[in-house]
Image (spheres, rainbow, N blue to C red):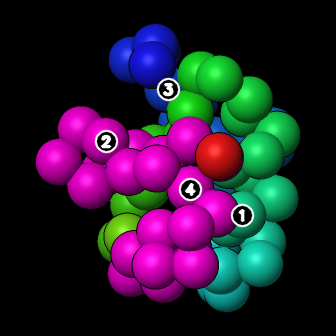
Amino acid sequence: MLHNHVWRDTQFPTAKKNKEDLYISIKNSKEAGFWLKGEEVEFGKQLREEKKIILCCGGKAATAI
């Protein structure tokens, strides 16, 4: 896995407010992965339990499976 994670996916980034929106951003980041911040970390844990993503960098970044 590359450790060149994407920080945000829009010109005016905001934290994702639900796991569905977060999952879309993680998928769109492709193999680079996506950094998680704040509440997104909890959504990331839920998505990992659903086997939709892999967490790395101490649970602060994610890549879609």
Q: Mark 2 = which residue?
A: 56
Whether residue 43 appears in this view of the structure is no
Using the image, tell me which numbered label, if any, was put on residue 41. none
Say which mark, if any, is on residue 23: 1
Secondary structure beneath dot 3 equals loop
Which three-letter amino acid code belongs to the residue tagged 4? Ile
Where residue 55 sits in the image (x, y, percent)? 38, 51
Q: Nearer the viewer, residue 47 or 41?
A: 47
Alpha carbon of mark 3 to alpha carbon of mark 1: how far?
15 Å
- Residue in the picture at 72% in, 63% down: 23
Residue at the left extreme of this rendering: 58
CA gap, disc 2 and disc 3: 10 Å
Which of marks 1 and 2 precedes in the sequence? 1
Q: Is residue 14 left or right of residue 20?
A: left
Q: Amino acid at mark 2?
A: Cys
Residue extending farthest to the front is 51
SS category of the residue bearing label 1: helix
Categorize mark 1 by other alpha carbons within 10 Å: few (<14), some (14-19), many (20+): many
| Magenta highlight range | 42-64
Q: Is residue 58 visible?
A: yes
Contact check, label 4 and label 1, Cβ < 8 Å? yes
* Residue 8: image location, x then y, percent: 64, 41
> Which amino acid is tagged 3?
His
Q: Which mark is residue 53?
A: 4
Label 3, on which residue?
A: 5
